[in-house]
Image (spheres, rainbow, N blue to C red):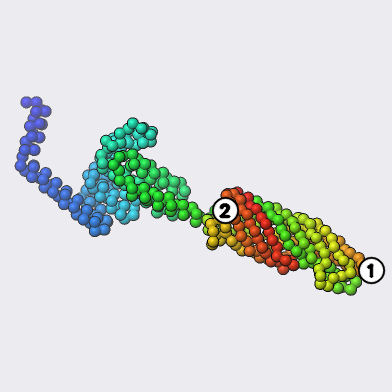
Amino acid sequence: MSCSRLLLSLIIFLISNPLFSQNNVERKEIFRKIIRQARMANQEGKFNESNQILQKSFRYEQRKLNTPAIVLLIVSDNYEKQGDYKKSIEYLNYYINREFKYQHEQNLAAYKNKKKDFDYDKSNRKLVKSYEKKARLFSKLYLEVKENKKPLLLQSYKKKADFYQGLCEKFKENTCYESSQIIQKTQSHIGQVEKRKFRYNWFAQYALLYYVDDLALKNQNTLAQHDLDALSIAPCVGAGFAYRNYLYEYNIQSCAFFGQSYVKEGSRFASNANYEESVFVYGLLANAGFYGKFFHPKVPVGFSLATRYRKGDYPDATAAGDTFRVLDQATVSVGAFFEIKYEHKHYDYVFKSGAFDDLNSLLFVFQINVNHF
């Protein structure tokens, strides 16, 4: 009798042997009991205990590739409910590669290459459920990542969540709704994160200033002082730096102005010089402030502290033998602005109204910012 026939006879004898069959039944019953205990612990929220039961019996941490499929699924579920989504994905991948490796690779290749005639529905329903779970797990990973994580990691989670969501939807009878809802929630969350995130940007500014300087005309002989009003309309060109998110902004900016100042004596304490001149003035306006979108998302309002340097070459005047000289031809002053801004894509339209200690009026600023992010 050949060796092969002897081996076949031995196998038939063992299978038909009552003792062998009894041991096999006992092993199956022990297996079912362990699985029931692990599932019960899972349902009671004792996820560590569930994993300990399975680890003690199957040593799944050391023998992942040889662990029964149902054990891998329970372990994956335990980790998901504990919030350890990376571990859950790890054991889900072992499950997929153990049970459906060939079909899984075919599905991935067809989806990546956008094969229109590929029949996804010939796949096992359990594999489809695994795709749904992977989409859900990557979505949850993406959702839990906070603002301080690396953008590349965020992008990776989103890409994988979208990938498995799309793959799951290729099957006619899919239940990918939960994953889809999580992805939508995730995208909304990330949108809020992006909105809250502060960013730096600089901007060029072009402005028009309107103000009335408070000057004094001094009689060099009698030392008497007389009021002068100097109406100035001056363009102002400069740049600024902002630190902003969707709700708040902190900024610092400055511009150089130059223009004509129309000087004449005020109604009070007039001199006999009848001083009236058109004078070229120039200077620097700088301010640092804060905006908040308290009323409208495109119309922030704010407040800033400012300083102004102004210089003008005001000529002397003579009358009836007296010499008159304009005081404070160069001056530095401080003040504060109330500001309102309308944001439109890359442009901001700004109106400011400010009070300064050396002006006879408010200082009005009409300004356009060109933003560079």
Residue most toward the front?
267
Q: Along the horizontal axis of the image, is 225 left or right of 238? A: right
Residue at 30 percent across and 46 percent down: it is: 175
Mark 2 vs mark 1, CA separation in Å: 61 Å
Answer left or right for 85 relative to 246.
Answer: left
Q: Which mark is residue 200?
A: 2
Label count reads: 2
* Residue 65 can be seen in this image: no
Could you tell me which residue is drawn at 40 percent across and 50 percent down? 184
Residue 181 in the image: state x and y as whole percent. 36, 50
Q: Which quarter shows the N terminus?
A: top left
Amino acid type of disc 1?
Gly
For this view, does 76 lie left or right of residue 1?
right
Q: Residue at x 66, y 65 (%)?
A: 336
Which dot, 2 or 1, sits closer to the camera? 1
- Helix, strand, or loop for circle 1? loop
Quadrant in which residue 263 is drawn: bottom right
Q: In the displayed image of the protein, which residue is found farthest to the top?
A: 2
The answer to whether mark 2 and mark 1 are in CB contact below 8 A is no
Q: Residue lying at the far left in this picture: please name it.
A: 18
Residue 296 position by quadrant: bottom right
Residue at left 23%, top 48%? 71
294 vs 103, nearest the viewer: 294
Mark 2 residue crowding within 10 angstroms, few (<14) / some (14–19) / many (20+): some
Q: Amino acid at mark 2?
A: Tyr
Which label sits on residue 150? none
Q: Which residue is mark 1?
A: 321
Q: How many residues crowd mark 1 within 10 Å: few (<14), some (14–19), many (20+)? A: few
